[in-house]
Amino acid sequence: MDDVFRALADPGRRTLLDSLRETPGQNLRDLCAELDMARQSVSKHLAILEAAGLVTTVRHGREKLHYLNAAPINDIGDRWISHYDRGRVEALADLKTALEAPPMSKPTFVYTTYIRTTPAELWQALTDPAFTSRYWGLSFQTDWKPGSKMVWTNHGVVVDDPEQVVLAADPYTHLSYTWHSMTPELADAIGIDDEKQQRWEAEGRSTANFDIEDGDPFVKLTVTHETDPDGLVLSMVSGGWPIVLASLKSILETGIAPDEPLP
């Protein structure tokens, strides 16, 4: 937490975060031009923000793209704000998603969290249906081989779609798959009306990616979700991923999911 507060204390770094909130996925050149800062100054500020976990980066071809990472802000909210009047600090809520309309050629949603676990344990948590059902409330039926179909069970509803497939599965390092379809049965189970269900189905297939980096004792997990930047899926996964990943972190670090009773 100390690194986060020190990083936020500088107005120039807060300006950088504001810029990345408004326009995710900027490279160094973009940030220098928009903020009228020297390249060296921007690089120094970005290094501090990245070290504090407030900025995460993704390689896109030869470019290094920068994104505001909401995880440390969520941790601040969970530790202190939830104990006070959350309504008085509602301005922080926007930082939880901080994901609006980058070009389609870039990852649309990026979120990084650090978990005290091992790459093997994290891989199991992402792929084992008994594990995913505890913190996510859903499970996958697949052999986790690239090209294999995935059958999702969500809120008791089985979603079996030939376009739901594993794209990549490199144990302990990288996982990628196409996102589930929103069937009328699933929409009814989770309270989505017919209009939203039809909008979801009209959007192109989106993709979820998980990159795992071992940093002993913490493992860095970066989730990117590629989808229509103006679509319904983005607005829903932007609010959903932080909750899912917070639950994942809780169960790996404490053995207890947030909604499970204490032993």
Image (cartoon, rainbow, N blue to C red):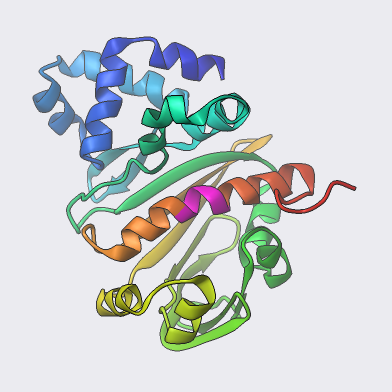
Q: Residue at x 90, y 48 (%)?
A: 263
Answer with left or right where residue 108 lies relative to residue 239.
left
Residue 131, horizontal then vertical, whole percent? 71, 64
Query: Where is 174 relative to 65, above or below?
Result: below
| Residue 19 picture location, percent across and down | 22, 30
For the N terminus, give its image quadrant: top right
**Vertical side of 22 occupied by 51: above or below:** above
Displayed quadrant of residue 167: bottom left
Residue visible at 43% across and 60% down in the picture = 209
Q: Residue at x 48, y 56 (%)?
A: 210
* Magenta range: 240-244
Q: Is residue 258 left or right of residue 192?
A: right
Residue 170 among those drawn in magenta: no
Residue 241 covered by magenta stretch: yes
* Residue nearest the viewer, comparing 99 with 26: 99
Name which quarter of the figure residue 192 lies in.
bottom left
Report whether 128 appears left or right of 175: right
Whether residue 164 is visible: yes
